[in-house]
Amino acid sequence: MAAAAIVGTMVNAMAVKWSGGFFAPRGVEYELLMAVAVAAVAIAGPGRFAVDRFVPVLRDHRVRHGVGAVAFGVVIAALTLVLFR
């Protein structure tokens, strides 16, 4: 769920800064990089030494949970943008 929170925050940050274009100094490339990196970690799931590895539900379906967390973050970010804009 931490990945969902970070992805949602980065989507909102990209929406706020989008008028600055893509490249620095006012661009969204850093926020996009952070969102993609967190999504990759969420989809990859817990590693060999993670505490989550000992939770069978998370270990068995890590791709499904990762994709679900990323999708949840994007949906909540879109809902936040629609409601508070």
Image (cartoon, rainbow, N blue to C red):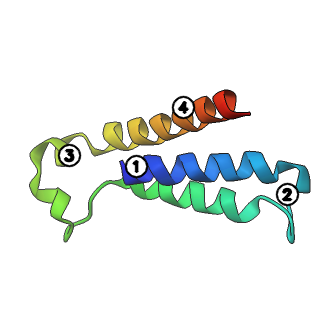
Instruction: Evaluate if marks 4 and 2 touch, with contact meaning CB atoms under 8 Å apart.
Output: no
SS class, disc 2 = loop
Bin the neighbour count of mark 1 within 10 Å (Cα to Cα): few under 14, some 14-19, many 20 and up.
Answer: some
Which circle marks residue 22 in the picture? 2
Tell me which label, 4 or 1, sits earlier in the chain: 1
Q: Which residue is mark 1?
A: 43
SS class, disc 1 = helix
Q: Residue at x 19, y 71 (%)?
A: 49
Relative to 26, residue 10 above or below: above
Q: What kind of residue is marked 2?
A: Phe
Q: CA distance from mark 3 to mark 4?
A: 22 Å
Single out the residue that lies furthest toward the right. 20
Q: Which residue is mark 4?
A: 75
Q: Which residue is mark 3?
A: 58
Tell me which label, 2 or 1, sits earlier in the chain: 2
Q: What kind of residue is marked 1?
A: Ile
50 horizontally vs 34: left or right: left
Bin the neighbour count of mark 3 within 10 Å (Cα to Cα): few under 14, some 14-19, many 20 and up.
Answer: some
- Callout in the foreground (2, 1): 2
Instruction: Evaluate if marks 4 and 1 touch, with contact meaning CB atoms under 8 Å apart.
Output: no
**Where's residue 9, x and y in %?**
57, 51
> Which of the 4 quarters of the picture holds residue 66?
top left
SS class, disc 4 = helix
- Callout in the foreground (4, 1): 4
**Where's residue 41, x and y in %?**
42, 58
